[in-house]
Image: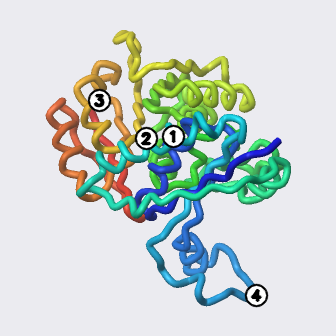
Amino acid sequence: MKFYELTIHTTSAGSELIADVMWRYTTYGVAISDVKDVIALQQNKAMYWDYIDEALTEDRADVLVKAFVPADEADKILPCIRADLEELAANCAGIMPLGTLESTRREVEGDDWLEIWKKHFRPLHIGKKIVVCPEWIKYEKQPNEEVVLLDSNMAFGTGEHETTAMCLEMLQKYLTPQSVCIDVGCGSGILGISAIKLGAKYAYLTDIDYVAVESAKHNSQINGVADKVTVAHANLLDNAQIKGDIMLANITAEILCGLAPSIPKNLKAGGTLILSGIIDSRLDMVINAFTAQGLTPEERIKRGEWLALSFKL
């Protein structure tokens, strides 16, 4: 099967947003190539090379985001991606630099790049207990670990990005065995599935993207937690009678603020709200939006350019 490899030139700050756009139109793979990842690995000593081209460690603004689109669908899909990128650029103007958004494409054979793409994934330890692992990798669970399997061919969040990792870290801090969790904008389902693996009583997941909903359902099944998870194709839960002890939303700041008035109806008194996907320039805006709804800021953590917050109702 032939594919087009579509490459978009962007920035570190914009790479996840660009990847999200691409995931709307393909389930065959999206990859981010950012030299900052190489620099971070060198500094953190998380990986070692015998030899490395010094030019690779030069911090450059250009980041490549690649998506793989079936060749026979390219004429329909590529214009849609371009239109969404132009809308994103307009919405981010003056807020977040997205770079040139220059695009190129080349034809590739599917079997070759699928195997190469899978090799980039590895088990990822987040917080004290969670290990996120691609389903095709055999990982031996260690004592006190909870392994969350993801089919990354359908991924909308693998835990590798700072925003997801911070949510998982906070979740491990606040969750109790009787917790009911609600994840708004669930993507791959990683947060809700992790909650169940950590002992939560039940998890409700919502997303406006149909492919994300199917991904979350699939990942719930391969983790053996589908009986404790409900996934809804919706913005938020329609049923105000459903109350969560913990609610999570890993979305951009503007969307978070738009959802703020609706969130308290599904959060128990004394419950915890965990938000991520926030950049510095939008921090006060988010805090103000949620304090206006009667929530009290509890904690904030920062990774790279991103922040996560917790509130109490």
Q: CA distance from mark 3 to mark 2?
A: 25 Å
Residue 259's disc is 3
- Identify the element where label 1 is drawn: helix
Q: Residue at x 48, y 70 (%)?
A: 62
Q: Residue at x 47, y 77 (%)?
A: 60
Q: Quadrant of the C terminus?
A: top left
Q: Residues within 10 Å of mark 3 (few under 14, many from 20)?
A: some
Residue 79's disc is 1
Closer-to-camera residue (155/88): 88
Q: Amino acid at mark 3?
A: Leu
Q: Position of residue 249 (x, y in %)?
A: 40, 36
Which badge, 3 or 4, is on the more N-terminal residue?
Answer: 4
Q: Single out the mark in the foreground, 1 or 4.
A: 1
Residue 2's disc is none
Closer-to-camera residue (256/154): 154
Q: How is the image coloured?
A: rainbow
Q: Amino acid at mark 2?
A: Ala
Q: Which residue is mark 2?
A: 83
Q: Position of residue 129 (x, y in %)?
A: 61, 49
Q: Are marks 2 and 1 in contact (CB under 8 Å)?
A: yes
Closer-to-camera residue (91/254): 91
Q: CA distance from mark 1 to mark 4?
A: 43 Å
Inspect this view and state whether residue 249 appears.
Answer: yes
Q: Amino acid at mark 4?
A: Asp
